[in-house]
Each structure stands twice: as C-alpha cells, then as structure tokens.
Image (cartoon, grey):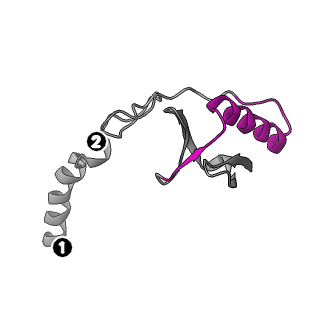
Amino acid sequence: MLKLTRLDHRTVAINPDHIAWVEANPDTTLCLIGDRKIIVRESMDEVIDRFMTARVRMGGGTPIHLPTLPPPSSSGRRQSMLPGRPSGAFNRPNLDAALIAPSIIDEEEES
C-alpha cells in the first residue's frame, strides 16, 4: 500500500495495483482503475518513488521499469503503445460466420 496525503491533510493508503496513471496538473492526481481520481500533496516523483519501493518490497527483487504512457487525449481515449487489434476490431461482424450460417441452415432443412 502507498501512504499518501490528500490536500486536506488526511492520510490515505492506496493499493498500487489500482493506479492507472499519475499526472501533475499542477496538483498530483492519481487516476485509479475505474475512473476514480485522488489528488495528493506529494509530487509525481515522490509517488513514483513510493510505487517503485512498494514493488521492490512486494516482489523482493529489483524495481520494474514501467512504460511511459501518454495521457489520454481530450476525448478521453489513450493511444495504445502496444501492438494489437486496430480500433473497433471487436465491433466488426464475423463475416466468416455470416457466410457459413446459411449452409448450416440448408443442411438442417434437408435432414
């Protein structure tokens, strides 16, 4: 857990696995998975140092090097730095299934 300080001086402990990204604008904002945001008094560098220290403690090894991701665009969508499917790949209809389906129906009708 990361112990950080909110702007009103309350201490909060955050699971580092729930941090999606950190930005400084000018306050340090932790953007958590699930679109929840927490603003803290610590600088972005302090948060990153604590994150890395927590990772070393949990894993018992050397710190991992996290890829630097650009913040989301004004539309709220983050550009992927990983190879993979093009945008909208899950929304495309499966054309192979559409071509096969009629032949299956014809075979069932003949039986």
Q: Which quadrant of the figure has residue 74?
A: top left
In the rendered structure, find residue 100 and report the number of the disc placed on it: none
Where is residue 23? Give x, y as percent. 53, 34
Where is residue 18? Give x, y as percent. 60, 50
Q: Nearer the viewer, residue 54 or 42?
A: 42
Q: Which mark is nearer the camera, 1 or 2?
A: 2
Q: Nearer the viewer, residue 99 or 82?
A: 82
Is residue 49 located in the magenta-colored stretch of the structure? yes
Is residue 89 located in the magenta-colored stretch of the structure? no
Q: According to the image, label 2 marks what residue?
A: 88
Q: Amino acid at mark 1?
A: Ser
- On screen, residue 45 versus residue 67, left or right, reads right
Lower position in the chain sequence, tag 1 or tag 2: 2
Could you tell me which secondary element the residue under label 1 belongs to?
Answer: loop
Residue at screen point 19% across, 70% down: 108
Quadrant location, the C terminus: bottom left
Residue range (magenta): 36-64
Q: Residue furthest front?
A: 8
